[in-house]
Amino acid sequence: MYVKVDNTQSVKLCDEDDLTRFSVQVPKDSSADTISNSLTHSGAGRLEGDGVAVDVNWLRLHTASRSQQWHGDFDRMLAYAFSKGWMSATGDAVIAHIDRV
């Protein structure tokens, strides 16, 4: 699964069926300000160091129609991320790396 950010402040969740990977994709020429503004404006998250803290509630909002099984798998993905230190200290955000595409 990945969060796609473009240079027009559009942010969307993509490839939700793949819970084995998580990243934020941005255009190669995106500035930190553009990425930050897009994430903040959409409520998806915030820049944190050289990654992105993606809001778990935003992820749940954008996957609300998924099956109960999917949500169970998603919760296991979050637990795995937490065990690896890939969650915020409060557990309200998943820390994702940025892929420039």
Image (cartoon, rainbow, N blue to C red):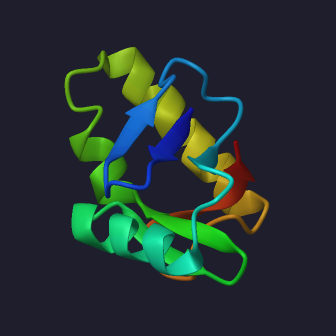
Residue at the spot x=25%, y=61% of the render? 42
Residue 91 visible in the current orientation: no
Q: Is residue 25 left or right of 91 when viewed as pictured? A: right
Name the quarter where the N terminus is drawn: top right
**Image check: 25 left or right of 67?**
right
Where residue 100 sits: x, y (%)? Answer: 71, 51
Q: Residue at x 58, y 63 (%)?
A: 30
Name the one closer to the observer, 89 or 62: 62
Residue sitting nearer the eye, 31 or 25 = 31
Is 95 located above or below residue 73 in the figure?
below
Name the residue at 68% across, 53% down: 28
The quadrant in which residue 37 appears is: bottom left
Q: Is residue 63 something one can see in this rendering?
A: yes
Vertical comparison of 91 with 17: above or below: below
Residue 90 image offset from top left, x and y in percent: 48, 80
Residue 46 or 93: which is nearer the viewer? 46
Q: Position of residue 53 (x, y in %)?
A: 53, 69
- Among the 4 quarters of the image, the one containing residue 47: bottom right
Position of 101 compared to 6: left or right? right
Total marks in image: 0
Q: Residue at x 74, y 69 (%)?
A: 85
Quadrant that contains the C terminus: top right
Q: Residue furthest right?
A: 84
Front one among 87 and 69: 87
In this picture, is 54 found above or below 1?
Answer: below
